[in-house]
Image (tube, helix red, strand yellow):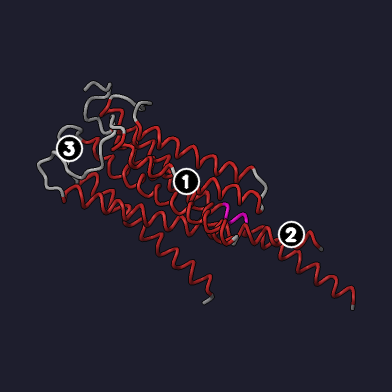
């Protein structure tokens, strides 16, 4: 069979395995990054809510 | 130790196990498995192509379960399960299509063939779940989008048995599922790397699902906090 690369060229096998590994690592990085962003937004919201609460308590006393 | 700390450590253990089994699967597939007589080294793509496809079917099955349960119970945990699994289903189906194409080019002499039922039904499956993810990302977060997505997630599953049985119904290029080979080595030389590959993809799916579910929980927490602030 003529495929332009030689019948048993390993490039296709290498590409298949590389794509699978890269896809999983990229997806894992993307999920971890989004998780970290959301966690920092949650922490910031909680912190600002706490400081507002502290301010209103000190203003009222 | 809090419950969430314990859960994180369980996720970590599953993650380490998944990548360890992935490495073993890679070694067995590339080094230990025999080259097939006709297809040569290209047949080794089988050890990533078939597990990707089978775990993609499982993930789409989980989308259907999550969608059906959400429509029945209307609880967010089922909706989150469906979103997380749909994303992984799309990734795994993409990998199935790409690795299949990389296998088809040297063996069939073509990257793609529109006459092959397995290829076309797999592409339709991929398009349905890409549409599902687009609906989720473009629609407002809320019960209306969740309901519409759940209906799509449930109806989209109809295509899975059609895709699986397409090779029996309309034979063309794609081979029938078999582990028999024309090599001189026994079937176990193919079966063991295949089963380890299946274990690796299954563990990786479980790990990534746990990570993705955790992300959905955090997003839900953030939405609740924002809603609470707006009410003040």
What is the distance, in whole Å, between disc 1 and disc 3 at their CAs? 32 Å
Q: Which residue is mark 1?
A: A26
Identify which residue, B170 or B136, lies in the foreground. B170
Between label 1 and label 2, give the one nearer the viewer: 2
Marked residue chain, label 1? A
Q: Secondary structure under badge 3?
A: loop
Q: Position of residue A54 (x, y in %)?
A: 80, 72
Identify which residue, A46 or B223, lies in the foreground. B223
Task: Tell me: residue A9, above or below residue B22.
Answer: above
Task: Using the rendered image, report if marks 2 and 3 lie on a common chain.
Answer: yes
Task: Tell me: residue B223, above or below residue B138.
Answer: below
Q: Overall secondary structure of the magenta stretch? A: helix
Task: Tell me: residue B86, above or below residue B73.
Answer: above
Span highlighted in magenta in the image: A34-38
Give yes or no for residue A37 being in the magenta stretch. Answer: yes
What is the distance, in whole Å, between disc 2 and disc 3 at their CAs? 60 Å
Q: Position of residue B4 (x, y in %)?
A: 53, 70
Marked residue chain, label 2? B
Q: Which residue is mark 3?
A: B36
Marked residue chain, label 3? B
Q: Residue furthest left?
A: B184
Q: Which residue is rendered at x = 49% and y = 37% of the image?
A: B127
Label 2 Cα neighbours within 10 Å, binned few <14 / some 14-19 / many ≥20: few
Q: Position of residue B227 (x, y in %)?
A: 74, 59
Q: Which residue is mark 2?
A: B227
């Amino acid at each position: 069979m003529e495929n332009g690369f030689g019948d048993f060229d390993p490039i296709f096998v290498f590409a298949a395995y590389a794509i699978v590994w890269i896809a999983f690592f990229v997806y894992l990085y993307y999920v971890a990054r989004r998780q970290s962003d959301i966690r920092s937004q949650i922490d910031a919201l909680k912190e600002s809510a706490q400081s507002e609460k502290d301010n209103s308590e000190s203003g009222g006393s | 130790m809090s419950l969430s700390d314990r859960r994180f450590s369980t996720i970590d253990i599953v993650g380490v196990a998944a990548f360890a089994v992935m490495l073993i699967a890679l070694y067995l597939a590339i080094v230990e498995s025999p080259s097939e007589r006709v297809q040569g080294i290209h047949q080794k793509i089988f050890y990533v192509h078939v597990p990707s496809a089978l775990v993609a079917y499982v993930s789409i099955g989980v989308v259907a379960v999550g969608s059906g349960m959400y429509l029945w119970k209307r609880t967010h945990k089922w909706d989150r399960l469906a979103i997380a699994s749909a994303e992984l289903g799309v990734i795994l189906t993409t990998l199935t299509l790409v690795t299949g194409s990389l296998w088809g080019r040297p063996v069939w002499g073509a990257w793609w063939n529109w006459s092959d039922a397995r290829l076309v039904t797999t592409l339709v499956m991929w398009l349905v779940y890409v549409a599902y993810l687009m609906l989720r990302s473009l629609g407002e977060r809320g019960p209306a989008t969740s309901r519409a997505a759940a209906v799509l997630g449930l109806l989209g599953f109809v295509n899975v048995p059609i895709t699986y049985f397409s090779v029996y119904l309309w034979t063309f290029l794609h081979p029938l599922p078999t582990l028999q080979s024309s090599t001189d080595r026994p079937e176990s030389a193919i079966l063991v790397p295949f089963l380890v590959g299946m274990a690796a993809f299954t563990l990786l799916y479980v790990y990534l699902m746990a990570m993705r579910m955790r992300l959905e929980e955090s997003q839900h927490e953030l939405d609740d906090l924002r809603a609470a602030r707006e009410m003040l």
